Image (tube, helix red, strand yellow):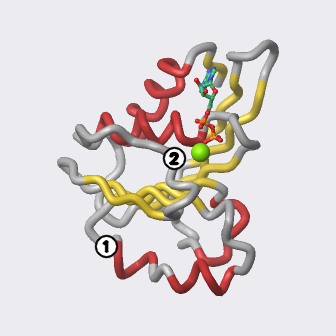
Amino acid sequence: MITRTPEETRAVARALAQELGPGDVVSLSGDLGAGKTVFVQGMAEALGVTEPVTSPTFTLVHTYAGRVPLVHVDVYRLERLGEFDDLALDEIAADAVIAVEWGDSVADALPPSRTEVALRFGDGDDERFIEVHRGEG
Ligand code: ADP
Ligand code: MG
């Protein structure tokens, strides 16, 4: 689908997150500035997170309390898959929804049941194309 504002992208994300629960993993792909973090902000709203969601690029993982907890991971700076395994995603997050920015770069370390969200730039500064492939889980 197409969005033309960050709020429209957050609305798409809210609709998806309403269908998610503990243990669900969402892998986000898209270039820098495509809107991955904005999308996770929308997910957080639907999960009942009240704390502001910011980019975890330098801390790698943020955990937010909510109706369902949200674990927000950005693997941009992880060069090797081994480092990502060290995060022990399944242990930190059995009770949470997990959103992984740049998830496509560590796809092998994510469950096959993951939902994939791809964001691409459209025309102008604000248009985005968003594709969501729901996981089986
Ligand atoms: P990423 O995490 O993919 O690097 P961010 O979510 O941090 O990207 O940034 C996306 C930027 O694009 C924000 O500054 C946001 O305001 C802007 N933006 C403009 N239009 C849109 C849109 N339709 N959807 C999402 N973000 C948008
Ligand atoms: Mg980001």
Quarter of the picture containing the C terminus is bottom left
Find disc 2 in the rendering and name its residue. 55
Q: Could you tell me which residue is drawn at 35 percent across and 75 percent down?
A: 92
Q: Position of residue 77 (x, y in %)?
A: 68, 65
Q: Is residue 79 above or below residue 70?
A: below
Q: Does residue 30 appear to the left or right of 74 in the view shown?
A: right
Amino acid under disc 1: Ala
Residue 33 sits in quarter: top right
Q: Name the foreground residue: 43 vs 18.
A: 43
User: Mark 1 and mark 2: span between their CA atoms?
Assistant: 22 Å
Q: Residue furthest right?
A: 123
Q: Residues within 10 Å of mark 1 (few under 14, many from 20)?
A: some
Q: Could you tell me which residue is drawn at 54 percent across and 21 percent down?
A: 6
Q: Quadrant of ligand 1?
A: top right
Amino acid under disc 2: Ser
Q: Position of residue 13 (x, y in %)?
A: 46, 34
Going from the N terminus, do you reach mark 1 or mark 2 first?
A: 2
Q: Name the foreground residue: 113 vs 65.
A: 65
Q: Which mark is residue 94?
A: 1
Q: Could you tell me which residue is drawn at 39 percent across and 42 percent down?
A: 53
Q: Name the foreground residue: 16 vs 47.
A: 47
Q: Which mark is residue 56?
A: none
Q: Is residue 82 above or below residue 119?
A: below
Q: Is residue 81 above or below residue 128?
A: below
Q: Name the foreground residue: 113 vs 122.
A: 122
Quarter of the picture containing the N terminus is top right
Whether ligand 2 has any atom under 8 Å from the Cβ at mark 2 is answered as yes
